[in-house]
Image: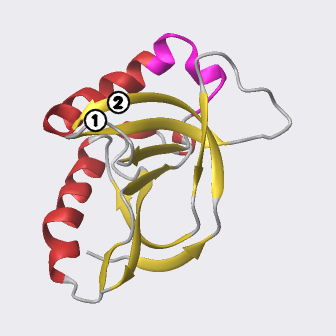
Amino acid sequence: MGCNIVNKEAFTVLARSRVFRYEDAMARIPGFWEEHYRTGGGSVICGMYGICLEEGGPEGSFEYLIADDLDPSREVPEGFVTRTIPAFTWAVFPCVGKMPQALQDLNRRIFSQWLPENGEYQMAAGINVEMYSDPGQFEKGTQDDRYYSEIWIPVKKA
């Protein structure tokens, strides 16, 4: 499982937010995306990112954001929030394949294999960023076998 270690500056996103429990998040988050687009949220946020934030929520849960980079010249519409993702060193994992299966599989492998076995890095914060390519660039959109996305994990030297 390959990754690149990169430094990224802090960035602020405009997002639709929902809290999920770990026990059923993989089953429920795809429905959140479907609801977001079905209710017109795609006209505000295209969904460049899916971001998991572990801090500040109830035990056993996390805040999940469907997000785009914030355009500071625009007002934050009702029902949306802004969040700033701090500057970190990130382990960036490329992912190719149909959504959400390819991304969910990679996410499991990062946490069950790469993090426990790499020896050089450990998690630096309770954040997980999914970065999505424009589905319009692929013949079958997010269901294309070549669809590209990434998972970013904040890391520090072990």
Instruction: Give the image location of residue 10, x and y in percent.
Output: 63, 62
Magenta range: 36-46
- Check if residue 44 falls in the magenta segment: yes
Question: Is 92 displayed left or right of 108 in the figure?
Answer: right
The kind of residue on which mark 2 rests is: Val
Quadrant of the rendered image containing residue 41 = top right
Residue located 22% across and 73% down the image? 115
- Mark 1–mark 2 Cα distance, whole angstroms, equals 9 Å
- Does residue 43 sit above or below 45 in this rendering? above
Numbered mark located on residue 19 in the image: 2
Where residue 78 sits: x, y (%)?
65, 15
Q: Position of residue 93 (x, y in %)?
A: 38, 67
Which of the two residues, 17 or 102, is positioned nearer the viewer here?
17
Q: Residues within 10 Å of mark 1 (few under 14, many from 20)?
A: few
Q: Please, which residue is most extreme toward the right here? A: 73
Label 2: state its secondary structure. Answer: strand
Q: Is residue 108 magenta?
A: no
Q: What crowding class fits label 2: few (fewer than 14 Cα within 10 Å), some (14-19), or many (20 or more)?
A: some
The amino acid on which the numbered mark 1 sits, given as a three-letter code, is: Pro
Depicted 152 relative to depicted 1: above or below = above
Q: Residue at x 32, y 51 (%)?
A: 97
